[in-house]
Amino acid sequence: MIAMMFNDTCNVIGVEEFSIFDSELEKLIKSGEYVLGNKSLTKEPLSAVTRNEDREWSDIVTWAIRALIQGEMNGLMRNPQLCNNDTILESNSTRLNYDQSVYCVGNYGEIFNRRFGENKRSSMNTINKGSPMIYSTPLGNIFGTKNDFQVMEEVIDGGVLKLVKSRKGDVLRCGVVVSFDDVNITSVDYCHVLAAALFNGDFEAVEFLTFRENDDVAYESLSHGIIDALAGTVVNFEGDVDRGFSYSTPYYYRDKESSVECYAFATRGDDTLFSSFLNAMVIT
């Protein structure tokens, strides 16, 4: 598309910002021959994609990327002396040293600056230090050719969604971890939101079970199907990788001493369909 600008096919083009960096067009912008607008037309989050049926591998990819961000937050940087460069693959994902991602390649900021140059990071791509953290993820084309009933019939073909829809009385069983008032109220609201998404707007179709913070009974209830989803959980490595649960996009952030806690829904990791449905509900 940039070539079309050079051969006068177009007078104005819209391109991804990163495609301009270190290009001939950037040099012409700096020389004043071309002008770069100061308003973004879209905001597209980029991520890695993995297959749904291999949850362990998906977790490894996710936490390797999170390690880069955590590394920048904590001042860890690329360090060849600490890079093991070991070709022996650990068979247990919980024993992987994710800091090696940083020591061998660099933290998030180092990788970004190495690719795009320093002073090119927008506020959305910087480490949070008190700035807003809730960001709307684009949903793509949600207006397909199938109607809602056709889609729901396909979605509830198995797993938790089928169980919920076939349960007597049509009701969602939602667990809530009781921690402090703001999160408690928010978590209850999100259980109502999930019920509305499941039952065509009936947000009252939900039964609540409450659990104490740091109580293993909450996760045991989720594992055994006593509850369908658990709200008010803190996203953590152990629950995701070691214990086999999935977390939704966080819906509440809380400052805690020198760190930030991310509160989200937890679902069973073996039901990727319900986990995806719940996460889509949160970002919607």
Image (cartoon, rainbow, N blue to C red):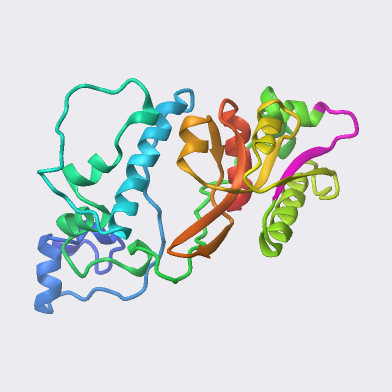
**Image coordinates for residue 48, horizontal then vertical, percent:** 36, 40
Query: What's drawn in magenta, residue-wise?
Result: 166-177
Q: For this view, does 202 lie left or right of residue 8?
A: right
Magenta-colored stretch includes residue 33: no
Q: Does the magenta stretch include residue 173?
A: yes
Say above or below: 271 vs 216.
Answer: above
For image coordinates 47% across by 65% down, the residue present is 257
Quadrant of the frame with the N terminus: bottom left
Is residue 66 toward the left or the right of residue 7 in the image? right
Residue 49: x and y, percent? Answer: 39, 36
The answer to which quarter of the image holds residue 97 is top left
Q: Residue at x 85, y 49 (%)?
A: 204
Q: Nearer the viewer, residue 245 or 23?
A: 245
Closer to the camera in the image, 130 or 7: 130
In the rendered image, the vertical position of residue 117 relative to residue 76, given as above or below: below
Query: Who's the residue at 57% across and 25% down the image?
Result: 270
Name the spot of residue 228 as percent of width and height, x first: 72, 35
Residue closest to the far bottom: 32
Q: Relative to 54, is 98 above or below? A: below
50 is higher (above) or lower (below) than 134? above
- Residue 235 visible in the displayed image: yes
Residue drawn at (58%, 44%) of the image:
279
